[in-house]
Every structure is written in structure tokens, then in C-alpha cells.
Image: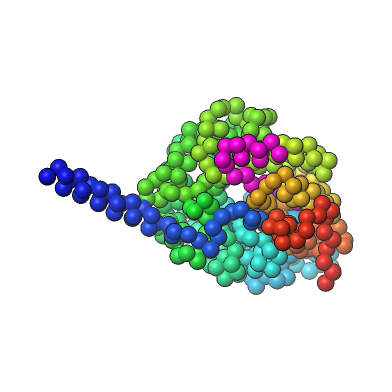
Amino acid sequence: MKFKRLFILALLLLFVSTAYAQSKHSKTSRFKSYKGLIMAGYQGWHNAAEDGAGRGWYHYQSRGKFEPGSTNVDLWPEVSEQKKVYKTAFVHADGSPAYLTSAHDASTVETHFRWMKEYGLDGVFMQRFVAEIRGRSGRNHFNTVLDNALKSSQKYGRAVSVMYDLSGMRDSIDVPVLISDWKNLVDSMKITSRGNNQTYLYHNGKPLVVIWGVGFNDKRKYTLKDVDKIVDFLKNDPVYGGCSVMLGVPTYWREFGNDTEKNPLLHEIIRKADIVHPWTVGRYGNEMAYSKYAEVQKGDVLWCKQNKLDYVGVVFPGFSWHNMNPGALSNQIPRNRGKFFWKQLSAAIQNGTEMLYVAMFDEIDEGTAIFKISKNPPVGASTFVTFEDDIPSDYYLYLTGYAGKMLRKQVPFRSDVPPPVKK
């Protein structure tokens, strides 16, 4: 009888601990699945010298300077709708000073989320770089950006999810950094426990967390075993786990191609996840080259279906990082009046992709941003990429929203790029 009572008591304790674990995350969200959504990556890493973060002109500057001839960015953002801007050392053709925003400011993030709603982008993956959040300055900045994004996502009804970028991560010493950070977001920021009307993105009934940088063969210090520990924590931890996981993997992950670590453990880890997210930025440079990759994508989609995994198609509008790398060509992968972007979007939908990821919302360093870009950037020692004369600054937001409607079959499929809307 005593043993029976102890056994019942143990079952009760197990039930209580399980209930407690479930209480860490709300049961559901306003966004119950990634399927049918078009999302973008949100870097949120640009600072201004006077924004209060103490990071100077972070990510705008190059080699410690931010002045004509020394900058990291190839695109100059359109700031006319922003409430708070900062004067720079750059000037326009008429001699007037050029201004920029800081991602540290709530008003900047709010304007971005307003654009997302206006143009039909469903939401963003908030980037958290492990190499940044292990230090106080970076952690404080990205916490501020994330907190502002959560507030704006509620206001404008957009989805948000955390994407951990492992680039720059050290070996296993940084695994606890990531795990501790997720625990802090869950406990202090209540990122997944804001009720059933919260805007944190769920998938397969669980909060979706992304681990980006899995299986690349570019001599990273962390290993697949380190990644496996992170995935195991997010999936199985009794208190902070119970999450769905999306893995950012190399372009040729399925066949262990030329950008992929030749290790069977990669596929074992992928099979533990929920969504596969192959990184394709820079892997093809025009519409014809993309057509070859489209065949790879078809095989990826089929493999995922056979292994009961979901697949997200990654697309990007163009690429340029001349100011960051002066030896590189400016406008290295031209946007071609939106045709390059649209070719990827339309073909991914034809290939059976149920979810889309745009790289990126605000990446002006590598020229992949889809948010509004200035038609009148500064002139002088630094050159900036602009769209064609008759292509408006908001064209890539418009194309993104249109593709989302096409993905959900709210508008007829079209393979030709939609022309800009006349205003």
C-alpha cells in the first residue's frame, strides 16, 4: 500500500512538472503555422552615434569610420517617413546633408512594421547573432530591437520569430550562451507566453525557433554535435523546450554539395527538425542561373515530403557589397527591374513551396533589402546602388506582398513580374 501511494505521488509530481513546463509557452498564437506565409529576415543591427546605445555608427561604418569613402552599406534607406533620423557626414547632389535611422529606436521599428502591414509581408524573423549576444552591448541592443518589434507586431498584426545566427560562434563554449539567452527571452521578455492572441510564430502547434548556420563547410569553429545539443534543448527541454525548429542549412545540403560539410550527422539533425531552410543568397546571379537551381529545389521539396519535414524557399532581390569589399563589383547581382526576384518567387511556388523567406528586410550592407530605398542617395567618395529610374522605392515590398497573395491563391498565379503600381 505504501509503495502504491508513493507511486501515485510520483505520478502527481510528474503531472505538475509537466503542466509547469507547458505554462512557459502559451498554448497557441495568432499565427499558428508558417504555412501560407511570406516572411523576411530582420537584421536590426544598424546604430547611430547618438541613439543612446553607445555603439557608434555600428554596421554603417567601415574600419572604424563612417564618412564618404568609408562605409559598409551599398543601399541608402529612404527615411522621409521616419520620425527620428540622424545627420551623417554624407551629402546629396544638391549639397544637403544625408540622414539615417537607428534600429535602436522604437519609431524606426514601428515604421518598418507599418510597411509590412501596408504591403502584405506577414512578418519577420528577428536575427540574434550568438557572437553579439554573448556581450552586454550587443545583447542589450538586440533585446531592445526585439522588444520594440514585439510591440509593433501586436499593433500591426505581424508575425515574429527568433532566428539564432551561429556565424561567429565559438565551439561548445557558446552553446550555453544561446541556451541561456532563450531562457531569458522566455522568462524576462515573455516572448512565447503572451496569450493565445500573441504574435510569436508557431508551427506544428509549438513556438518556432530558427537555428541558422548548420552544416556549412567554411571552417566554422562550432560542430554539428554542438548544433545537435541546441536542437535537443529546444525540442526536448521539459521547461523551456517544446519548440518547433527550423534549420538554416547550405544550398546543397541534400546531396552534400560543394558548400556542405560531408557528415551524415547533418541529415540526422535535419530529420529531428520541423522545417528545412536552405540558404541560397549569392548561389546564382541571374534568372537563367536560377533555373538550374530550381531543379535542385524540386528535389529538396520531394526529400522533405518523404521525410515528413516542411520546406521553406529562400529568395533574394539582388546583391551588392562593394563598399564593404572595395575589390568587389558594385551591383554584383542586379535586380533587373524586379525580374530576378520574381523569377525566384514564382518558381518556388510552382515547385511546391508552401512557405517563403525573403532575404532580407533591412540588409543594406549586402544590398538585399526589400524595404524602401532612397532614389536620391548621397554622392561622393562612396557609391550607392539605386533602382532603375522608373522603379519606385517601395517596389520590392509590393512584389513581396503580391507573392504572398499568390502563395495563398488569393490572386491568380503569374510568371511575369507585376509592374509597379502607379500612384
Front residue of this view, candidates 370 and 60? 370
Question: How far from the left and from the top, in percent, is residue 223?
Answer: 51, 33
Q: In which quarter of the image is residue 32?
A: bottom right
Q: Give the range drawn in magenta.
A: 298-324
Q: Where is residue 326 in the image (x, y as percent from the top left)?
A: 76, 44
Does 155 appear above or below 144?
below
The C terminus sits in image quarter = bottom right
Q: In this view, does 130 lie to the left or right of 280?
A: left
Tell me if residue 408 is in the magenta stretch: no
Say whether residue 182 is left or right of residue 289.
Answer: left
Residue farthest to the left, as pictured: 2
Residue 405 falls left or right of residue 32: right
* 145 shown above or below 164: below
Asked if the stretch drawn in magenta spans residue 309, the answer is yes
Q: How many labels does the image show?
A: 0
Q: Residue farthest to the right?
A: 389
Residue at (58%, 34%) from the top-left corner? Answer: 215
Name the quadrant of the N terminus.
Answer: top left
Where in the figure is residue 67, as x and y percent of width and height? 71, 56
Q: Nearer the viewer, residue 83 or 146?
A: 146
- Near-viewer residue (146 or 350): 350
- Residue at position x 41%, y 44% in the image: 236
**Considering only vertical position in the picture, is 414 above or below 112?**
above
Colour theme: rainbow
Q: Which residue is depicted at the point 29% across and 51% down?
A: 15
Q: Position of residue 155 (x, y in %)?
A: 57, 70
Quick one: 325 or 276, which is closer to the camera? Answer: 276
Mark yes or no: residue 215 visible: yes
Relative to 62, residue 308 above or below? above
The residue under the point 82% across, 66% down is: 421
Left or right of residue 24: residue 356: right
Mark yes or no: residue 146 visible.
Answer: no
